[in-house]
Image: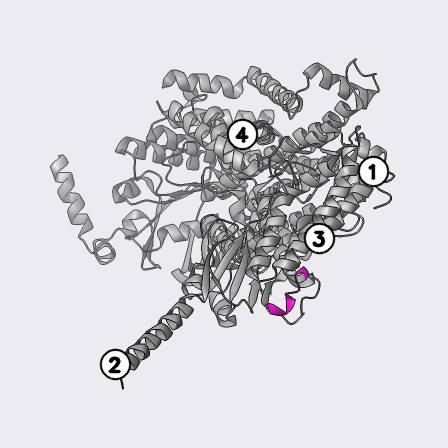
């Protein structure tokens, strides 16, 4: 036990671990980009990237079709999966820390039910905003998700000025259940759209492209950098509400800011790819188990683990029943749950 | 000097504590005593601005109502019971949390001055050899000293104690109070504690505020307040008689 | 009465009773529907409920719209159907309403059965006959559907006429199609919200593609599938067909990320096919068949 703790501390503080993790990230990204309905070698992928960004002439044997597939379809898809996975994992870590509840998930704060309801209404009404066309759905999903979280935070602060964790969790549940009920009713009335709504909820990265990456990136950057700035405060919150206050942390304000950042991260993830579950709940636990609970470690590693996991599951989703695709949301739980159980069993021995 | 004037506070709009007035002079260790449910903890939480209150709390002619969290932390620090802390911080890291209120901005780290203060604080509780040990590996008594050091590192004018040593053995209890007493006298600061053990209270405090059912029954030195009648009325048991009986057995 | 007369009277009475009894049981005929289920066909079919637009179209062409007492909501645009007809949601049919309408027969489709649950079980217990016509996966199947519906409604002559007409037109197109040696590759998209939807072999649409002398890029798959974008781009079809009723769908397909290099996009060979006639297995597939032929080989089929 003592030796385990010692090696743990080495991992926590070691620069080598950082290099290892970053290499893992690049490895997964490369594998993701090279595997698909047709496999392309990593050398060819690098050649295509070089051609597109630096105008280096293509290597022999690569035709326009391959370039289109890799550059326009696979690469943005892999990056999108990484962004979404990273966002969800960080958001989950934040919510679990702030609410001091290992079962807390940003989805229980209403983001997913709000976004689903918004998108459901959109699908049923067939409405589309001119100029942005296919980006109407992510925009609506995002706005609805964020609004829901704001409503929950506001509601909690009215009901309980100190915004205790129980109040927040209960408010989240009330709103979520209510919005879900509305969505179910709408789906029952417009039963022919049930499939579209359900498929959207199950999550998918197909048919998104670079335009989604361009919108997703700023939210991802703002969200993760914002969260990193509050790593120390999140550490302090772990010592308890009273302790945190007595040391000088304005807990209500910090909690509010963190929950809003989490909403931005989750809202944009849901907007991009639907409500993919499991990553936000389980990845933070895994990271803490292996690397300890200090947030200045947890948050960046959650980005890498969450991102890689999502790239991997999307890979499985799009290759396992070629030429068809499975929804990513189904795969995340299918792969994740047994893997999580395995890690936990192994560590507890 | 810390002045408490007409303080009333409670939970859910019901006042647990009514119209409390007393003062604490610099260099003093004051204990708030009383039976269970008399409102001691509630009173202490109000002084730490952890709950809402009516009335005034004035520290050296500054009304603490106007101070934000960080400003308040520079003046008042709190120690509570510390069980089950599994956060992977070392002793050093935990004590340096006490400097949080002095940091400017999210990304700033401890200045040389901050580091010196932290090391001093750790030294003053005799934990310097263990400064890089994880707090999850410490004993209960050692952990309590870590949080005491953190309170010291905050460099406050007042330290509040909310029954911090109930769960610890006698040695730890005595230790903590000795550290605090020394700190208060040496640095001309104030310690306000809520303690159950009347013997410790008797030995260590300069002044006592005795509460019963949310009101002040007596305030003054232990000799003035611990009158047999007072104690019997408040605690419903002959405290003095019991203590003397116990003392005889020790002899 | 004389004994001989009494005996004759007895035989007469018995014969009358027997013919009456036999007449009673002869009110229905036992038959098998298109899904292989046994059912009892009532002697007279005057009131019909149709639950799927393909069947409603067949009924309409057979001249039976006036016998409809209720339809599903998608059948509302079928030729000749009265706008006053009650429209029922057949995903969750209300048994009371159906029984209350008192149809002689309900013509259900494969779409109505989800899993092993029979949504009409209760209705059948109330004594109403329900026949199932599962969605046909071949053109031959459509002929049999038409003949079956004609048979149970006593309109066999018209039914045979319809089938013969279809066969004639399809054969003439097939003859042209068979002459094409350099077959164009086609991708026929039937949906694109959240994922792409298309089909492989064992579908009447696939048969239609082959009839006109083209080949479906997904012919190796079976039935209805949801392919990934990569597959389509890699297969590089010469022509893209879609029957999605969304506005500007052709433009949307053309501007999809990564599809620029596809031959069909480069040469602007993206065409919209009429939705109803390409998704309902009825006699009206002829309409979309001709649209498809002209879209893929405009010069060759200019005359049809």
- CB under 8 Å between callouts 3 and 1? no
Judging from the image, what secondary structure is the residue with disc 2 in? helix
Q: Which mark is residue C3?
A: 2
Of pointers 3 and 1, the one earlier in the residue sequence: 3
**Which image quadrant is residue C52 in?**
bottom right
Q: Is residue A169 visible?
A: yes
Mark 4 falls on what kind of element?
helix
Region rendered in magenta: C61-67
Q: Quadrant of residue A68?
A: top right
**Disc 1, SS:** loop
Count neighbours of disc 3 (C-alpha within 10 A) and say few if under 14, some if 14 to 19, many if 20 or more: some
For disc 1, the chain is C
* Residue that badge 4 annotates: A298
Q: Determine the residue positioned at 40% across, 66% down.
A: C25
Evaluate whether label 4 is on the same chain as label 3.
no
Res C297 label? 1
């Amino acid at each position: 036990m003592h030796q385990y703790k010692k090696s743990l501390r080495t991992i926590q503080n070691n620069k080598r671990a950082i290099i290892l993790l970053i290499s893992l990230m690049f490895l997964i990204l490369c594998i993701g980009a090279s595997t698909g309905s047709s496999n392309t070698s990593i050398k060819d992928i690098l050649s295509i990237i070089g051609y597109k960004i630096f105008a280096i002439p293509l290597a022999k044997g690569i035709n326009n079709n391959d370039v289109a597939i890799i550059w326009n379809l696979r690469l943005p898809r892999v990056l999108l999966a990484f962004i979404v996975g990273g966002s969800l994992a960080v958001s989950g870590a934040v919510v679990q820390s702030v609410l001091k509840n290992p079962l807390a998930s940003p989805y229980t704060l209403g983001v997913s039910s709000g976004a689903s309801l918004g998108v459901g209404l959109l699908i049923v009404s067939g409405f589309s905003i001119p100029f942005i066309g296919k980006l109407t759905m992510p925009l609506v999903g995002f706005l609805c998700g964020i609004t829901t979280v704001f409503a929950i935070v506001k509601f909690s602060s009215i009901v309980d000025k100190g915004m205790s964790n129980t109040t927040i969790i209960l408010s989240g549940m009330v709103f979520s259940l209510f919005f879900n009920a509305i969505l179910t009713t709408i789906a029952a009335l417009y039963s022919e759209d049930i499939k579209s709504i359900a498929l959207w909820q199950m999550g998918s990265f197909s048919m998104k492209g670079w335009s989604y990456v361009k919108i997703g990136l700023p939210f991802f950057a703002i969200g993760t950098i914002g969260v990193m700035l509050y790593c120390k405060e999140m550490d302090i919150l772990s010592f308890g509400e009273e302790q945190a206050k007595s040391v000088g942390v304005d807990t209500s304000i910090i909690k509010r800011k963190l929950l809003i950042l989490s909403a931005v991260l989750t809202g944009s993830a849901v907007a991009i790819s639907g409500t993919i579950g499991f990553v936000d709940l389980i990845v933070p636990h895994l990271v803490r188990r292996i690397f300890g609970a200090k947030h200045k470690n947890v948050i960046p590693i959650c980005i890498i683990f969450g991102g890689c996991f999502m790239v991997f599951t999307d890979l499985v989703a799009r290759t396992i029943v070629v030429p068809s695709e499975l929804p990513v949301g189904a795969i995340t739980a299918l792969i994740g749950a047994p893997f999580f159980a395995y890690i936990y069993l192994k560590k507890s021995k | 000097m810390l002045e408490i004037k007409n303080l009333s506070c409670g939970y859910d709009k019901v006042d647990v504590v009514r119209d409390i007035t007393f003062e604490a002079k610099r260099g003093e260790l004051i204990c708030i005593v009383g039976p269970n449910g008399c409102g001691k903890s509630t009173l202490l939480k109000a002084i730490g601005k952890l709950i809402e209150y009516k009335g005034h709390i004035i520290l050296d002619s500054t009304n603490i109502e106007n101070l934000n969290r960080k400003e308040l932390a520079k003046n008042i620090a709190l120690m509570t019971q510390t069980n089950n802390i599994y956060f992977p911080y070392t002793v050093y890291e935990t004590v340096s949390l006490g400097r949080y209120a002095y940091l400017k901005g999210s990304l700033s780290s401890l200045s040389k001055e901050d580091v010196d203060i932290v090391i001093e604080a750790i030294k003053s509780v005799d934990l310097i050899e263990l400064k890089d040990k994880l707090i999850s590996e410490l004993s209960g008594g050692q952990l309590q000293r870590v949080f005491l050091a953190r309170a010291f590192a905050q460099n406050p004018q007042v330290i509040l104690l909310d029954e911090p040593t109930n769960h610890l053995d006698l040695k730890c209890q005595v230790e903590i109070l000795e550290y605090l007493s020394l700190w208060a006298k040496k640095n001309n600061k104030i310690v306000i504690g809520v303690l159950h053990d009347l013997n410790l209270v008797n030995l260590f405090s300069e002044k006592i505020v005795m509460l019963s059912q949310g009101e002040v029954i007596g305030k003054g030195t232990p000799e003035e307040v611990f009158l047999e009648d007072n104690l019997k009325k408040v605690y419903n048991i002959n405290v003095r008689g019991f203590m003397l009986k116990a003392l005889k057995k020790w002899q | 009465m004389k004994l001989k007369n009494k005996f004759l009277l007895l035989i007469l009475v018995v014969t009358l009773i027997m013919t009456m009894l036999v007449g009673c049981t002869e009110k229905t005929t036992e038959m098998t529907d298109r899904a292989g289920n046994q059912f009892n066909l009532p002697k007279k079919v005057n009131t019909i409920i149709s639950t799927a637009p393909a069947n409603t179209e067949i009924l309409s062409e057979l001249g039976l719209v006036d016998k409809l007492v209720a339809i599903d909501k998608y059948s509302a645009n079928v030729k000749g159907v009265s706008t006053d007809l009650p429209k029922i949601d057949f995903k969750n049919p209300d048994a009371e309403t159906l029984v209350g309408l008192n149809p002689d027969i309900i013509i259900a489709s494969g779409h109505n059965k989800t899993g092993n649950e029979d949504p009409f079980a209760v209705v059948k217990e109330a004594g109403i006959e329900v026949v199932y016509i599962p969605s046909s996966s071949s053109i031959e199947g459509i002929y049999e559907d038409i003949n079956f519906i004609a048979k149970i409604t006593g309109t066999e002559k018209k039914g045979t006429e319809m089938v013969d007409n279809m066969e004639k037109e399809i054969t003439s197109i097939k003859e042209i199609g068979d002459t094409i040696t350099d077959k164009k590759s086609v991708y026929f998209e039937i949906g694109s919200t959240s994922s792409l939807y298309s089909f492989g072999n064992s579908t009447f649409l696939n048969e239609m593609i082959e009839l006109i002398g083209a080949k479906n890029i997904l012919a190796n798959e079976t039935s209805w599938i949801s392919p990934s974008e990569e597959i389509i781009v890699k297969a590089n079809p010469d022509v893209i067909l879609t029957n999605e009723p969304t506005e500007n769908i052709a433009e949307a397909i053309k501007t999809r990320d990564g599809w620029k290099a596809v031959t069909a996009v480069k040469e602007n060979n993206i065409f919209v096919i009429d939705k109803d006639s390409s998704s309902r297995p009825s006699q009206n597939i002829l309409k979309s068949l001709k649209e498809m032929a002209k879209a893929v080989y405009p010069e060759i089929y200019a005359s049809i």
